[in-house]
Image (cartoon, rainbow, N blue to C red):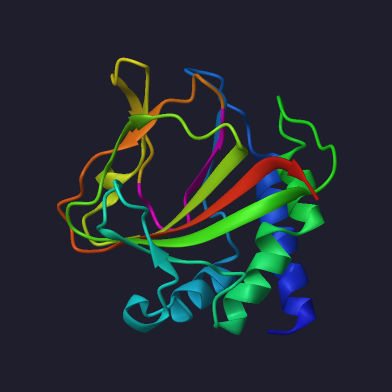
Amino acid sequence: MSAISWEKYRKYTVAKLQQATVEWEPYWHVVIEDTLDPELYELCMQYWPNMATEMSRTNPEGFNQNRAIYIPESGSIDFWKEYYHNIMQHTDVQQAVYSLDGLEYKGDRWTTSSLWEDYRGYGVNNHYDGHTINTAWQIYMFCDGGEQWGTSVTDEQDNEIKRFPFRPNFSWLMRVDAYSWHRCDPIPCNLRQSIMTRYMYKLL
């Protein structure tokens, strides 16, 4: 991939973030349609790892095991290393994320990344994320079961308030705190793919 292409793709997503509006109910979150430049979305699908040979790890013991995980920055596929450095971790993207209302840019953050591939039966009970995570950002790539299998925004009693539609290239961001309850119902479909970026509290 040329540097010019990455710059173009990055500017596209930065603009999407800058145009986004924060939703405050029931807690801080943002939704973005067409998150990635269409060319970059197609490249992501083209270079999506074969989890049978490229999987980095599975979920920890005690978590649902119907998920395969690939770590872009440490995997063997050059495209995903470049994606990590040019999109996920890049200063321009971080500054755009932290220009959203309710966030503040204090410097680049330690960034963790995952490509998630979920299989039939995968789900996560109602929870909020660990305190080491500042902001989570998930981009939906593909689901063979339709758009009803996105993440549910909930309250502490597990009442669903809204559900993000699992549409290709749709994404959501969530500021992590003790109010940001959410869950993923067990999926009846065969394949669901997404990209997760987490900006941690730790600054670089």
Residue 84, quarter of the rendered image? bottom right
Q: Is residue 204 magenta?
A: no
Q: Measuring 26% from the left and 45% from the top, which residue is drawn there?
A: 123
> Which residue is the extreme one toward the left?
188
Is residue 52 at all visible to an observer of this figure? yes
Q: Measuring 24% from the left and 39% from the top, which residue is drawn there?
A: 185
Residue 186 lies, with reference to residue 45, above or below; the image says above
Residue 2, quarter of the rendered image? bottom right
Left or right of 134, for residue 29: left
> Which residue is the extreme one toward the front?
61
Residue 107 lies, with reference to residue 21, above or below; the image says below
> Which residue is the extreme one toward the top?
157
Left or right of 120, for residue 102: right
Rendered location of residue 202, percent (x, y): 73, 42
Q: Which residues are magenta?
A: 166-176
Rendered location of residue 110, percent (x, y): 71, 51
For the residue pair 89 and 21, the one nearer the viewer reads as: 89
Residue 121 lies, with reference to residue 51, above or below; the image says above
Is residue 18 at all visible to an observer of this figure? no
Left or right of 137, for residue 123: left
Rendered location of residue 72, percent (x, y): 56, 69
Q: Tag count in the figure?
A: 0
For the residue pair 161 and 107, the one nearer the viewer reads as: 107
Residue 13, quarter of the rendered image? bottom right
Left or right of 198, for residue 195: left
Q: Measuring 81% from the left and 55% from the top, which residue is drawn there?
A: 91
Q: Measuring 19% from the left and 63% from the top, which residue is drawn there?
A: 190
Residue 49 lies, with reference to residue 112, above or below; the image says below
**Which quadrant does the N terminus fall into?**
bottom right
